[in-house]
Amino acid sequence: MSTVPVLIAGQWRPSQSTGTFRVENPATGEQLPGEYPISSWADCDAALTAATEAAAVLRTLPREQIAKFLNRYADRLDARKAELVDLTHAETGLPKAPRLADVELPRTTGQLRQAAAAVLEGSWALPTIDTKINLRSVLGQLGPVVVFGPNNFPYAFSGAAGGDFAAAIAAGNPVIAKGHPLHAGTTRFLANEALEALKETGLPLATVQLVHRIEPATGLRLVSDPRTGGSGFTGSRGAGIKLKNASDAVGKPFYAELSSINPVVFFPGALKERGAKLSEEFAGSATLGGGQFCTNPGLIILFASDDTEKFIADVKTRFEAANPPVLLGKPVVRSLTEGVAALKAAGAQLLTGGAPVAGPACRHANTLFRVTGAEFLAKPHQLQTEMFGTASLLVVVRDLAEAAAVLNQLEGNLTGSLYTDTTGADDAAYTKLEPILRARVGRLLNDKMPTGVAVSPAMNHGGPFPATGHPGFTAVGIPASIRRFAALQCYDNVRAARLPVSLQDKNPNGKMWRLIDGQSSQGNVGG
């Protein structure tokens, strides 16, 4: 069996590999066609050299050409939708419809087109002009960006098509994609469509490159190489923190989505008013997609009462009635099993589930744990272990003071939700707890489950460390996500003709918002 090539410098070429791996169908355990390489440093070194050369060319190209590539790439993916979805379904077990065909792929191509629109409009780059001292600045190219794709979103967060990819390209950077081994064929398909779009639009062919898998030491070297401008990572906390440390050690930007248990607080009035509806809402969110979402509600805070006991019993019944879906692969089952074991070791009471489901498919029983507020406060670190799957911990507190103490022990999270009644009975308690939770999450929700991340300019899909690598940035939401992969470039007394077009006196398109002498304007300097 021949080994699948890597994409370097515009060519699919044999890898200088240290080994190989295969992809399995998680629904059947069957090995799928194709043997993929584990790239050595030689592959990464060659990709960085090619990306550096591509970056030099990209700096000279009009932004319209980059936008044209992003739009053409999106068009190509839409045109081959059926073929792509079939491949991804076989590799991941994710449903063809609605998940892949009707939700994730349209979101992905929509992100690419939103990025293209931002490139054309230009305000994302924050052009700033001070005419009094002839000083001007704008966000510009950072350099080659390495994007590590995750297991759970093979399109929308892929290293070769997802949000970090679109943001890095929009900022004018070449991307080196590190595919995920659980869906290597999907990432190869995406990268090949990107390559064809590059050819059609005239961008340097090394603007998009792909290695399928690398050893951990190679990854550390890649993110910290002097030629690397920055990196984006979505994946496990353990691997992400090692990569972050390597990047931080040499001052390289590293934007990561690391882990989150997404606390949800149900206030007493809310449960009394609509407890059955809320148990249905929570169980539906927790079991959606096998719980394989970074915004899955993993920690639920409840106040001791009869209404709470009814809620818990109802949720348990719903967890047991929901058929455990196929998970993304054996590593996901193994990681979830380890997380469950950590909560058991910390003394959490298992209400249901707690073990993998026997058979060839990758499945794990829907799992629900319970502790008191005092038990949580005794072992807050262990009881915040992320369980990536349909698994949640219910924390039943005595009163408002204990709830506040629990929230004060929480690590940084992507989201936090607060459910209150509609008559105002919970308002005083909300006022006391909201400031504590607000400081520990990137996105605060009211009366809404956290699953689902809208691709909106107002979205923050980030959070305080350790949920993410940098608390002030988001992986979703253009234009903010683009700015992560840009450098602030200042021009002091530079002659007009030598300035980037966005900083010249004439507004290049009449639509770009620029800060001119402290005033936001779409006009010309002096106009």
Image (cartoon, rainbow, N blue to C red):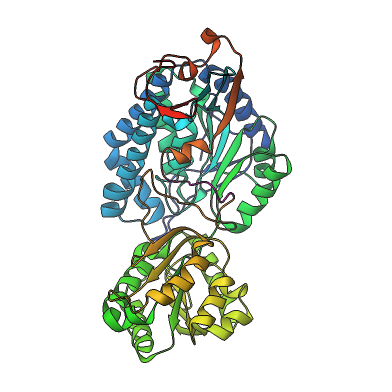
**Residue 519 covered by magenta stretch:** no
Main SS class of the magenta portion in the image:
loop
Q: Position of residue 39 (x, y in %)?
A: 61, 39
Q: Position of residue 296 (x, y in %)?
A: 42, 64
Part of the protein shown in magenta: 470-476
Q: Determine if residue 3 is in view.
A: no
Please tell me whether residue 518 is drawn above or below residue 454 in the rendered image. above
Quarter of the rendering occupied by the C terminus? top left
- In the image, farthest residue toward the front: 132
Q: Position of residue 509 (x, y in %)?
A: 36, 19
Of the pair 184 and 436, the residue shown nearer to us: 436
Q: Position of residue 402 (x, y in %)?
A: 54, 82
Q: What residue is at 36 percent from the left and 46 percent from the top? A: 455
Q: What residue is at 53 percent from the left and 83 percent from the top? A: 373
Please tell me whether residue 292 is drawn above or below residue 198 in the rendered image. below
Identify the image quadrant of residue 198.
Answer: top left
Viewed as shown, does residue 130 lie left or right of 41? left
Of the pair 60 and 440, the residue shown nearer to us: 440
Of the pair 329 and 207, the residue shown nearer to us: 207
- In the image, farthest residue toward the right: 249
Q: Determine if residue 413 is in view.
A: yes
